[in-house]
Amino acid sequence: MRLGLNLGYSGAKLGVDVQLVQDAERLGYHSVWAAEAYGSDAVTPLAWLGAVTFRIRLATGIMQIAARTPAMTAMTAMTLDALSGGRFLLGLGVSGPQVVEGWHGQPFGRPVPKMREYVTIVRAILSREKPLEHRGEHYQVPYAGPGATGLGKPLRSILHGRPDLPIYIAAIGPRNVALAAEIADGWLPVFFSPERAGLYRAWLEDGFARRARPHAGFDVAPTVPIVCGPDVKACLAQVKPRLALYVGGMGARGKNFYNDLACRYGYETEARRIQDLYLAGKKDEAIAAVPDALADETALCGPPERIGERIEAWRAAGVTTLICGTGHPDVVRMMAKLAL
């Protein structure tokens, strides 16, 4: 099992801890992952880090597909991959309706067929087998819809990219996870629980059964919050605000994928209460309503000995890259000692 380092996305101010990433590289970490929501983007920090690192992979976790045309994403991926000496990993996600329509001004559409088309176009650009042409429900290249001039011409990338550049898909629902297993090189789950490995395995196997290429080497790469300290409950308390935000407020009532996931885990009553409190503006109460058990099964918390024991559950669940959610140098070093 490899280790990754998650940078997340910015708050009000953006700072990239270059020294932390360089330490992770020196310790043998496989990859560093940058994210985006509706503030900092996922690409610029990786370009910044690519100039001051040499081996660690530079990965997006994730680039929102509503923010860029497939061609722009392929161009960005090829550019960073070329400049970094083949170190780029392309993580993609659909985000959610609130961000897609409320921030990017794009229709959310049907996420599974939209992602399928998107990856198809990106792979076609990377392969350079022929000039790009695509006719789908969500994307038409060359464009021939309303307002088209009729002058669009199928083009082939000037830059010769890496045809097998790895593509990861972020997904938590059954159909989206199956899609990742069918068409991608890796899967980026959030709030992954090793105790629910059987649930995920059925979804993955569904996708593998339809896969055109062998799935050996398929990378299961969850981001896992890590909080180290002698008091387990105090560590769990640091994990709960993020869970409350996503389960309670990252989506509308009836259209919150993270709330749905908590329900699938068996926390239906708790998930409803967290959402009710969060949407009512009672954020502290929503945080307090997050069960210890949910926080514990989706994170690594406690003293080093307990974290070391818990790591084995993630390994046994089929995780191949554990992306560490921490900004603390001591925890980065501890995880290298425990897992590598």
Image (cartoon, rainbow, N blue to C red):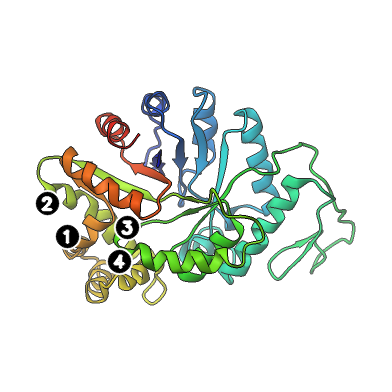
Q: Mark 1 or mark 3, which has the lower sequence index? A: 3
Pointer 1 with pointer 3, Cβ within 8 A: no
Alpha carbon separation for disc pair 3 and 2: 20 Å
Q: Amino acid at mark 3?
A: Pro
Q: Mark 4 or mark 2, which has the lower sequence index? A: 2
Q: Is residue 335 left or right of residue 34?
A: left
Judging by the rendered image, the residue that carries numbered circle 1 is 292
> Can you give x and y, in whole percent of width and height, for residue 94 in the image?
53, 60
Q: Look at the image and tell me in which quarter the N terminus lies.
A: top left
What numbered label is drawn on residue 248? 4
Q: Amino acid at mark 1?
A: Asp
Pointer 4 with pointer 1, Cβ within 8 A: no
Q: Which residue occupies the extreme left position in the image?
A: 231
> Can you give x and y, in whole percent of width and height, for residue 50 in the image?
53, 28
Q: Amino acid at mark 4?
A: Gly
Pointer 4 with pointer 2, Cβ within 8 A: no
Instruction: In this rendered view, identify the residue nearer to me: 251 or 127.
Output: 127
> How many neighbours does mark 4 have within 10 angstroms: few (below 14), some (14-19), or many (20 or more)?
many
Residue ID at (57%, 33%):
87
What secondary structure is marked by label 4?
helix
What secondary structure is marked by label 3?
helix
Judging by the rendered image, the residue that carries numbered circle 3 is 194
Q: Mark 4 or mark 1, which has the lower sequence index? A: 4
Alpha carbon separation for disc pair 4 and 3: 22 Å
> How many neighbours does mark 1 have within 10 angstroms: few (below 14), some (14-19), or many (20 or more)?
some
